[in-house]
Amino acid sequence: MWRRSSTRLTMPCPVPTTPNGVYHHFQRAVVSREDISHGEVIMLTCLPGFQQMGPDSLRCWYGEWAVDNLPECVPSKNPAANLVILKENKSISWV
């Protein structure tokens, strides 16, 4: 008896755009819309003064990110995380 195979195409996933965050693939920063191969994982790092909300890694699965919601980088609620010290001017500012 012949059976129809239910194969799925292993499509790449474009790196999402996350304001105030940088995605990494094997320690290499990747740019928004860069293609990541099926089965590969990227990690999000938020810029100083921002904290991550949501998953810390995304796996590409058949052309889609295998998460319910993409992560975000939101302003930190910790005032110390928003502090930036400018060494040249020896001044302190808040972001």
Image (cartoon, rainbow, N blue to C red):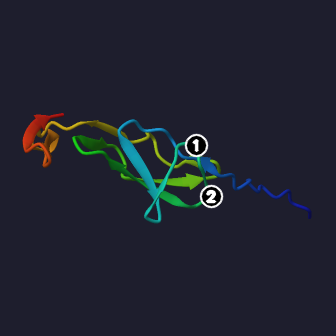
Where disc 1 sits, the SS reads loop
Between 92 and 42, the residue placed more toward the observer is 92
The residue positioned 39% from the left and 35% from the top of the image is: 19
Residue 18, image quadrant: top left
Q: Relative to 36, does residue 53 appear above or below in the rendering?
A: above
Quarter containing the N terminus? bottom right
Q: How far apart are labels 2 and 1 at the CA level?
A: 15 Å
The crowd level at tag 1 (other Cα within 10 Å; few <14, some 14-19, many 20+) is few
Residue 69, image quadrant: top left
Q: Amino acid at mark 1?
A: Arg
Where disc 2 sits, the SS reads loop
Residue highlighted by disc 1:
33
90 on left or right of 3: left
Between 82 and 71, the residue placed more toward the observer is 82
If you read the primary sequence from the N terminus, does the residue marked by circle 2 or circle 1 appear first? Answer: 1
Quarter containing the C terminus? top left
Residue 52, image quadrant: top left
Residue 94 at x, y percent in the picture:
13, 34
Residue at the front extreme, as displayed: 88
Residue 90 at x, y percent in the picture:
7, 45
Between 91 and 2, the residue placed more toward the observer is 91
Residue highlighted by disc 2:
38
The residue positioned 70% from the left and 56% from the top of the image is: 10
Which mark lies nearer to you, 2 or 1? 1
Tally the marks.
2
The residue positioned 45% from the left and 41% from the top of the image is: 68
Residue 47 at x, y percent in the picture:
30, 45
Between 42 and 90, the residue placed more toward the observer is 90
Residue 66 at x, y percent in the picture:
51, 49
37 on left or right of 82: right
The crowd level at tag 2 (other Cα within 10 Å; few <14, some 14-19, many 20+) is some
Q: Amino acid at mark 2?
A: His
